[in-house]
Image (cartoon, coloured by chain):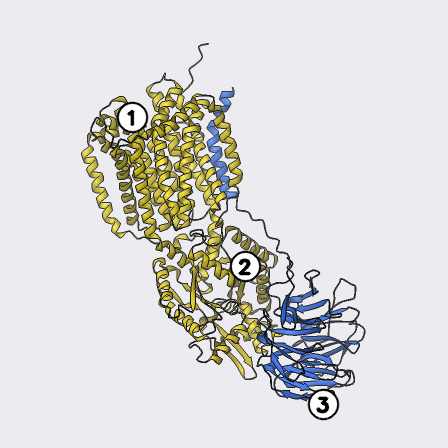
Amino acid sequence: MVAKVFGFVAQIAPWAVVASLGYAAAFIHPTVEPLPLPQPLTEPRDIFYDVASANGERFWFVGNAGTVLEGTREPEGWERHAMPEPINLQGVAVTPENTVVAVGNEGAVFIRRAGGEEWTSQRLPVSERAGKMVDAAWLNGALWVVGEMGAIFRSDDGGRNWQSLGLDKDIGLNDIETDADGTLWITAEFGDLIHSTDNGESWKTRNFGSESLRSVAFAGDGTGVVVGNNGAMLHRSGADSGWQSLESVTSEHLYDVGFDGERWLAVGNSGAVIASGNGEDWEKLRPEGFGSGYHTRLNTTERGTVIAGQTIGLLRASTWNTWPVEEN
Amino acid sequence: MMSLSRFAQALSEFCIRHRKPVTALIVISTIAMAALLTRLEVYTEFSDMVPQGHPYVDVHEEYKETFGGSNKVSIMVAAEEGSIFRRSILKEVQRITQELAKVSGVNPFQITSLASRKLKSVNASSRGIESVPLMWPDVPETREGVETLREAVLNNPMVYGIYVSNSQDSTLIQVDFYDNLVDYSKIFPQIQSILDESPVKNQVNHHLVGQPVLYGWVNHYLGETVNIALASLGAMLLALFLLNRTWRGTLLPLVSGVVSTIWALGIGVLLGFNFDPLVIVVAFIITARCFSHAVQLITRFDDLCDGEGIQPKKAAEMTMKELFRPGLLGLVSDAGAILCVVLTPIPLLQKVSIIGAIWVLTIGFSAVILTPVLLSWVKAPLRNAHPLNLRFLLTAVLTLAVKVVEGRGRYVVLPVTAIAVGLLVFKATDLTIGDATPGSPILWEDSSFNRDSALINENYPGTEQMFIVLSGDENDVLKRPDVLDWMQRFQRRMERMPQVGGSLSLADIVVDVRRNLYEGNPRYRELGNAQIENGELISFYMQGAAPDDLAQYADPMFRNGSVIMFLQDRQGETLRQATHQINRFINENPLDGVDVRMAGGSLGIIAAVNEVLLRDQVEAIALALLVVIISCLVVYRSSASGIFFMVPVLISNVVTFAFMAWQGIGMSISTLPVVALGIGLGVDYAFYIVDSVKEYLEKEPDGDAVEAIRQSLYSAGRGVLLTSVTLAAGVLLWSFSSLRFQAEMGLLIGLWLLVSAFTSLFVMPSLVRVLRPRFIFGQPAPSSN
């Protein structure tokens, strides 16, 4: 009986082996253990447009595709936030209470209240054709947002309600800043420098040529510097002085300028970074490792200047550290 | 119907009786075939390696002329020190770019470098919009001009990091070739010659990668490959001479091998086949089969002449008759196994399969017939050609095999083998489908090609490319914001893969043009809000451009577009991950009115090959086993004999796959025919051993089983051992090859030979004795009770 069973099995076995191999050939495919591809902290295509901080220790960077990066000077504690919509974010401001306000295209405003985790979104009433909000700032105890089509918005209640103070004309506003006297200054397209001495109720415009002006900054003594396209620079030596054009040390577009208490710094296209002790005499800096792409915003602190752009990081003296620092 | 034994007897009687005409016929045929060999072409044909009918290949074939073929060559020009932004180096880039247009088979519209018209900068300001080539037609004359060029490059994300390294110390020149005009034997030397003529050799170094370069290297080593093959042949003949101690034992296998090779290659020429240098390994294996059959015949002949005192002519006839059955079985199984590969939809494998099967069948004439015929002229008594007797080495191994099967060892061999094979199966499951290492597995890791490849991957997004196609249902669909946004999101997702160094699409151009349109303001580096706006941005880019400047990314009607991904290696796992992630994104992000198809480019083709390889490999094994079963069924009238002869095949396969997994040898288009032929190797030896037992018992129906096995081991076993040791000695020389593939395949075949021999000498005899299969021993005698 056993012999018969063995014999039968032996007769069938070869066909069974071939049949099972045939089955394997038809139905078994190489498998792949898929990589989870989790959202990394930064991606190669990230571009950051603005950086803000309330205390000079925790920084908020905003950029394209609704990216908000929160980080510190240390490798630890960095976090990437995704907005409800992947809208390009252009500006960010942080109130003294640590409410973070990010603004971007199509009048988008995203707010994260102090101590909260959620981002709320709202839309400012902007032009459908050109509704990019370019800068957000905490100035004179209020939140300010400026952008395309002369859009200017002020919020006195931490971003809950916004008042339109716009210029009602087709002009792109690039940066809003205040001087020691509380005068609001806005740099704009086509060489316009706009200011308001009544907290935005009325605006006066002065033109400085055809190059777009990108940013304005002031020192405590009233000294001010404006930078713009093709290396355009304006300087005033005090609150009572007028703005004078400077001969620039670069022909690159300059996108932002700031004063860290000791020196002026400006950044722009093609890795341009220039510095000055008095705001009048500028020289090029070539920090080692500084990215050769564009940088759109800087945030001066007592412990160096944080810069946002194609790369983000900290510039102290002539030393550049790219952020986020990779953990070992 | 005439039985196989009667046919064998009739044939052997006929051949020996008419030995002169038979020999003359074979000689004349061989001379005629040899004349054809002058038309033999040795080259690699790219289209031979493309699996027909695979959806990736369909996509590739449809769009290769525009979105990028699979024969791209990348040349990195690196400054010895400092930046490449020096006139002398830029002139060198221009020189190479211009010279490349003269290379055989080049697609002149697909030469991309700083000095080509394709790389442009789009500048828009209050003065207007300019879309100008970066460095075409002339290299900047002044230092200021060079500096302006440098700034233009740094501001162009389509160039900086992709065609100029981030450190600015090197630049990339890419050139593509028409697939149907590609001649690997010409492209590589021609490009190499352009680089050798560099007037600034002290300032730059060149690095060269790409499919045509890889196969150029294979051609470059063709001479060495032939030399190794000859040395290997010489080593085998020497081993035969030392061990056999006779000229006939040395020269007749050589004659068989040569005749067989001439016939097979001649038929190949008649069929219009080219000879791929990479499949020389296959040729070697088949020649090894030929040697094996000839050695078996000579060994049996010597036994009959020397051992039984039979006259050479009669001994030759008996040899032919006795070994006809196992010889035929072996040849049919070999030919069947290799012929099964014809079902693989890859032309190279189909050609290898057809010519391989023909080659194996020619052994039927060159060894099974010609060898006994030539042996019939041997003068008696047999004499040794040299005094050195090394046969004791073979005898020692055979005696051990006999002792195992005679004693209780036979019960140990089987479970030990089963356990060992079980463990090896685990290891074999690690076998990689596709390439298992970065760089090319055809060349050694420290080869110039692989070092250049690693260097370019280090400085640029990746040497290997794959593209997907977005195929719309109407013209201008690519200008839709949602379509361009899809491309951007897709690129973001794919670039999360560590092996993806970067990607390019029409969306990258659109956002860059828009940024430039807004005074270079990076805040406007984004897509237009409407289809019409994106259309305008694209038309800005095309102002002053050649019609084909966007060809890499979109067709002229903007109905079909590509996203090109740069990958850092072509490993099987990388490609499976990439295709999986692409599929996943496509499924999760459907696009209205757009069909997203994958995947073209060199990596698309390789991914397609990898996808069919496993199926075809298993299919080939299944069919080869089927051939073995059917052969057994015909010859032994027993399907159970099939399972018996599967044992050595399965053992050989498992050991080989485990070895490949251990050594990091991936299963590829190059290894598949080797593995398919290995099945024949596995079963041949077993046929000779087992059939010899059966032959003995047919002659001596009352003979003792142990005696039958003993004589089989000392006779057929000697041939098995002699062949395997001889061939293994030969293939060892392959390990000196500059082509890693040849070296590894040599090692693989050597291992296969030894495993097959071990299985035939130690496992199969024990199986025969323990299981006493009916097809060997016949029906058990009825019990007297």
Q: Measuring from the top left, give residue B594's x and y in whole percent.
A: 55, 62
**Disc 3: which residue:** A241
- Marks 2 and 1 close (CB-CB < 8 Å): no
Residues tagged by mark 3 and mark 1 found on one chain of the structure: no
Report if the CB atoms under discs 3 and 1 are less than 8 Å apart: no
Which residue is at 41% across, 52% downward?
B49
Q: Which tint was used for chain A?
A: blue
Quarter of the figure with residue B762: top left
Closer to us: mark 2 or mark 1?
1
Residue closer to the observer: B510 or B668 = B668
Location of the N terminus of chain B by quadrant is top left
Q: Which mark is residue B500?
A: 2
Residue type at mark 2 is Val
Q: Position of residue B73 (x, y in %)?
A: 42, 62
Q: In this view, does A62 lie to the left or right of B88?
A: right
Mark 2 or mark 1: whose residue is earlier in sequence? 1
Query: In this picture, is A196 found above or below B303?
Result: below
Check if mark 2's residue and mark 3's residue have beta carbons within 8 Å. Answer: no
Report in which chain the residue with disc 3 lies: A
Q: Mark 2 lies on which chain?
A: B
Which residue: 79% across, 73% down?
Answer: A161
Tell me the shade of chain B: yellow
